[in-house]
Amino acid sequence: MLKKVIAMTMTVLLLLVPVSGMTVLADEPPFRMSISVNEGDHEHDELPLRQELYRWIEEYTNTEIEWWWFGWGHADQLALMFASGDLPTVLMVNNPHSDAAFAMAVQAGAFWDLTDYLDQFPNLAHMHPVARQNVSINGRIYAIPRARAIGRNSFGLREDWLMNLGLNMPTTIDELYDVLWAFTYLDPDGNGLDDTYGLGMTGHLGAWDIMQIWFGAPNGWGIMDGQLMPAHMFPEYDDALRWFRRLYADGIVNPEFHEFDAGQWDTLLRGPAGATADVVDRHRRNHEHLLNEMGIADTWTMIPYIDAGHGPRSLPTLGFNHGLAVSKAGAPTEADLLRALAFIDAMADPVATPVIDWGLEGVDWEFNEDGHIYIYTNDERIAMGNETNNHHRLGINQLQHGWRSPETTALTPTTTPPDSAVRRLEASIQPYIAEYAIPNLAAGFTSPTMLEVGSELNTLIADMRRDFILGVIDETAMHEIKQQWLRMGGQDVIDEINELWSASRPDVCPTCGR
């Protein structure tokens, strides 16, 4: 239990850190607050284990909590709460950057602007810049994003095909072309048939987006001549499209890829295709399928990026799912806000994490001899006389935001690490991908014109990219379509985004100048 004792000591030290003129001490009066997050319901409030869980959270955080549970109907209640102004202290909102009802409530002053407070808390201070940027509303943060892996997007390919052909793992764009050509024309599966494609693609646009970043194109929007511009206006975007067009013209991509159902992608990747760009878990799942179902070893592997002359670059995910906002109705003073943020921050500390994520020690889990979390099976729960349906835990894990300082991360217990090579690779590669993530510099800014005609503008550019790759249009037509985009409202979008960007604080995204 040494690890647990160390974690407890670390948490006590964290709780003694002065926060904007106040100190979170255990001998202060409990902070009375209310919470509404997804999944939980009042039907199970009287379960002894649920009451024990409530007590643990309150005692640990020195709070008295009123829980507002709406089960899976929580999202439906948000509009009603926004309209009535009857808001809990801490409220889980959908996707803060794109939820119009939340944005209107923010505009009406119902929620605290958290931007200038986050760095005062040991865990929230380490929120990833990409997530900060993406969760913002016109450059300001009104909800704590609940972390999701930022470094999921990678390039996957058949390692067994490389070995069959005596090829090395590609690292540059020219080496990748040679590998994809060989996968198409040199019979990598050794069946004597002309039945393989180097690159397996579908109508899903994300795969092109992942590779486009390698060529220096921005993620959505980047800086050109001192202002924000959309990616398709950059020459690096055109460089990427020329390479994609070459792949298609040379027969390296499956024909009519744009009409291939994305739902059947795995079928393509478990058969005739030797590579693609997508999330690391797709590559891992297909590796495990080919190994377990077909007995083929050393199949799909993954690499973080290909160097197309611009060094390591990766396309991040949004970096979060939903967010935790603090209302002014539930926290009317700055002192209340700081107590609420201290509570949220503590949800990811080394002692709270196992409870918030997995439940009560000795009821839901225990530390094994290696210091890892071991989660009880249903049979073990039954033998101990405990519940097997986890009703006592419903909704509690929604309080986990997942941002941690390096010190907190080092002390936070985890479950047993993955036991297979591909799962270890998946786990190890994600932080590396995240390190080189390119943020979308316009994420979080809302252009009125984009709200009006965004669908038409986006479709125009998506169709242009597809048709250029397929060879339907040439470069002259491609640039004419870009001018059409500007005339249809794109120039207004650029002007509006830049006005908002200029008015926002530059330190919202510390990597914006990268």
Image: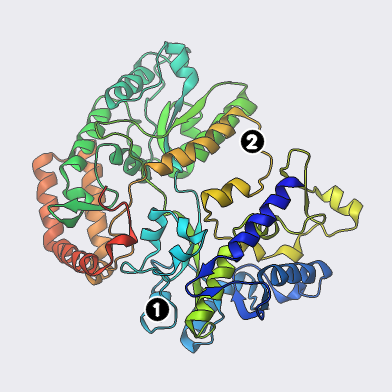
| Image position, residue 342 (x, y; %) | 56, 69
**Residue 261 shows in the view:** no
Q: Report the side of 84 relative to 441 (left or right).
A: right
| Image position, residue 290 (x, y; %) | 58, 27
Which residue has dot 1 on it? 106
Which mark, by number, is residue 418? Answer: 2
The three-letter code of the residue at mark 2 reads: Pro
Residue 128 sits above or below residue 268 on the image = below
Residue 204 sits above or below residue 112 on the image = above
Q: Residue at x 63, y 72 (%)?
A: 25
Question: How many numbered marks does the figure carry?
Answer: 2
The quadrant in which residue 10 appears is: bottom right
Q: CA distance from mark 1 to mark 2?
A: 42 Å
Callout 2: SS: loop
Q: Residue at x 29, y 68 (%)?
A: 446
| Image position, residue 501 (x, y; %) | 23, 65
Residue 386 sits above or below residue 91 on the image = above
Q: Earlier in the sequence, mark 1 or mark 2?
A: 1
Callout 1: SS: helix
The three-letter code of the residue at mark 1 reads: Val
The quadrant in which residue 397 appears is: bottom right
The image's colour scheme reads rainbow
The quadrant in which residue 139 appears is: bottom left
